[in-house]
Amino acid sequence: MPSSVVSKFIYDGDTETLRVIYVSGMVYDYKKVPLEVYQSMAAAFSKGTFLNKHIKGNYEFEKVGD
């Protein structure tokens, strides 16, 4: 099911960075996200709900584009 919040997300295992591209066009990198958390997000029914519950507020982030 397409997300109404998350357009796309990419994981870099070397740096443990989760890049989230929002439907709005904003791009954020979440730092030091374990592979297991990325895999859980990939498997989640609602990417936006998972992001809000398990990523935001739990990992440092950097806005990299909009």
Image (cartoon, grey):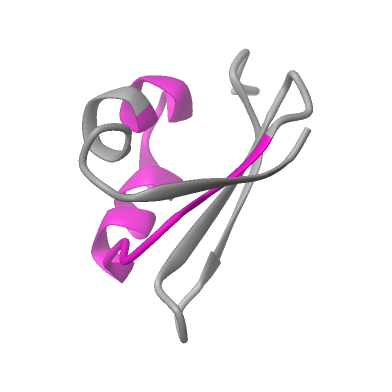
Between residue 60 and residue 46, name the one nearer to us: 60
Q: Quadrant of the N terminus?
A: top right
Q: Is residue 16 magenta?
A: no
Give percent across and percent down for residue 30: 43, 52
**Whole-percent x and y of residue 23?**
72, 22
Residue shown at the point (36%, 20%) measured from the top left: 49
Spot the residue most to the top. Answer: 4
Residue nearest the viewer, comparing 62 with 2: 62
Judge from the rendering whether residue 58 lies leftward or rightward of residue 50; answer left or right.
left
Residue 51, quarter of the rendered image = top left
Instruction: Count the numbered circles shown.
Output: 0
Residue 47 lies in the magenta-colored region: yes
> What's the residue at 33%, 23% (across, down)?
52
Name the side, left or right, on which 41 lies relative to 64. left
Question: Which is more toward the observer, 21 or 59?
Answer: 59
Q: Is residue 55 left or right of residue 64?
A: left
Q: Check the picture and name the quadrant holding the C terminus.
A: top right
Q: Residue at x 71, y 31 (%)?
A: 26
Across and down, in percent, residue 50 comes to: 33, 30
Looking at this view, name the residue that lies furthest to the bottom: 14
Q: Residue 6: which quarter of the image?
A: top right
Q: Check the image and report above or below for 30 versus 26.
A: below
- Residue 18 against residue 59 in the figure, above or below: below
Q: Residue at x 36, y 36 (%)?
A: 44
Left or right of 66, for residue 29 = left
Q: Which residues are magenta?
A: 27-51
Height in image: 64 above or below 24? Answer: below
Looking at the picture, how far across and down is residue 37, in whole percent? 27, 55
